Amino acid sequence: MAVDLETLEDLLKTNLPGASIRIDDVRGDGEHYAAHISYSEFAGKSRVQQHQMVYSALGNKMGGELHALQIHTSIPK
Amino acid sequence: MENIVFDRIKKELAQDDVVLFMKGTPVFPQCGFSAAVAQIMGVLGVSYHSIDILQDADIRQGIKDFTNWPTIPQLYVKQEFVGGCDIIREMYEAGELQQLFENNGIAYNKAA
């Protein structure tokens, strides 16, 4: 099962309001994505906590229908 | 049920200072993300205990609940969750992983 890029982007934009998000379909197969997320709420959080926020924004999709998502988090300057 | 699995996970974590839950084994990883972390550990020459979660459905689900982290691989140092593939890669490239091993008295190849 796959998740399309728009669905992914919508979920992240809705649940991480104000974040700057770029998603690449790294293999062009709709299964392997890389998300670059810059979000002010990441400030003061560990990398693990930042990624947990992203996973939580994706609901239960990660590890289920969404297998391969690289996550790169940053804090806007 | 959950407690039994969590106890088993804690026992695995107690087996070594560095523990990697992965798909497959360091020699035969079954997923690119697991392979990437095993490769970094190999380059750094760190000895670690690995668990192939594909061999055990209880651990496979249990480790995700244990850490509140939905993906594999998962690397632990001194029983603390350090991160998944992206985090380990970022930390390695920034030298932070090496620093973490240094701070925890874990031997690694400093020339790497």
Image (cartoon, coloured by chain):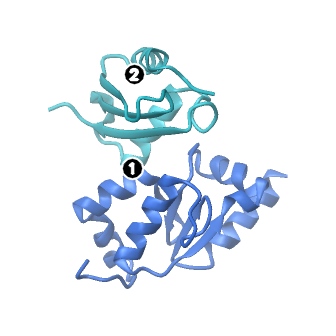
Chain colours: A cyan, B blue
Q: Residue at x 41, y 41 (%)?
A: A70
Q: Position of residue A5 (x, y in %)?
A: 44, 20
User: What amino acid is labelled 2 in the image?
Assistant: Leu
User: Could you tell me residue B95's position as x and y percent?
Assistant: 24, 65
Mark 1 lies on a secondary structure that is: helix
> Which residue type does callout 1 highlight?
Asp
Which corner quadrant of the image does residue A51 belong to? Answer: top left
Classed neighbour count for the residue bearing mark 2: other residues with Cα under 10 Å, few (<14), some (14–19), many (≥20): many
Question: Which residue lies under the disc numbered 1?
Answer: B86
| Left or right for B85, reference B16 | left
Question: Residue extending furthest left?
Answer: A77
Q: Are marks 1 and 2 on the same chain?
A: no
Q: Is residue B63 above or below residue B21?
A: above
Q: Nearer the viewer, residue B35 or B16?
A: B35
Work out whether residue A36 or residue B24 is closer to the camera in this orientation and state it: B24
Q: Is residue B101 above or below residue B65?
A: below
Q: Chain of mark 1?
A: B
The chain that hosts pointer 2 is A
To which residue does mark 2 refer?
A: A16
